[in-house]
Amino acid sequence: MDKKNNKHEVIVSTEAAKMLVSHVRFLAVVSEKAALNLISEFERNTRTLENLPESNPWLEDPSIPTHKYRKLLFAKRYLLVYQIKEKTVYVDALVDCRQEYGWLLL
């Protein structure tokens, strides 16, 4: 079987990309190495979604539809929020778990 056919396409939304840039800018003030690390971890984790996006848990909250979004924790404190539609993974948000992100769920 061709492994390429089993891969999902991963699309990072404009909003999620802006969130990444914001986090990287903030980190770069403190440590350029930490900022570059976050970019690498983001890229590595989005690539993992190509093969097994269903392996991460559902994002559960009463304000969102059941089984719409999944979550992936990476780099100790960042959360990728994504949904799967057929063979496409849509990364919709990137949040720092140390911050309040309830607004995202509204």
Image (cartoon, helix red, strand yellow):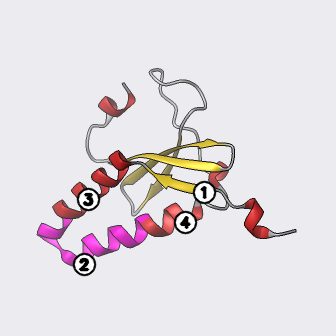
What is the spatial separation of the Cα atoms under label 4 and label 2, in whole angstroms? 21 Å
Q: Amino acid at mark 4?
A: Arg
Res 33 quadrant in image: bottom left
Quarter containing the C terminus: top left
Residue lying furthest right in this view? 1
First of labels 1, 2 by sequence position: 1
Mark 4 — residue? 47
Q: Which residues are magenta?
A: 27-42
> In the rendered view, does 100 fall on the left or right side of 94?
left
Q: Amino acid at mark 1?
A: Glu
Mark 2 — residue? 33
Relative image position of residue 45 (x, y in whole percent): 50, 63
What is the spatial separation of the Cα atoms under label 1 and label 4, in whole angstroms? 9 Å
Mark 3 — residue? 21
Relative image position of residue 16 (x, y in whole percent): 36, 49
Residue located 65% across and 56% down the image: 8
Question: Which disc, if any, is residue 55?
Answer: none
First of labels 3, 1 by sequence position: 1
Front residue of this view, candidates 9 and 74 = 9
What is the spatial separation of the Cα atoms under label 1 and label 2, in whole angstroms? 29 Å
Determine the secondary structure under disc 2: helix
Quarter containing the N terminus: bottom right
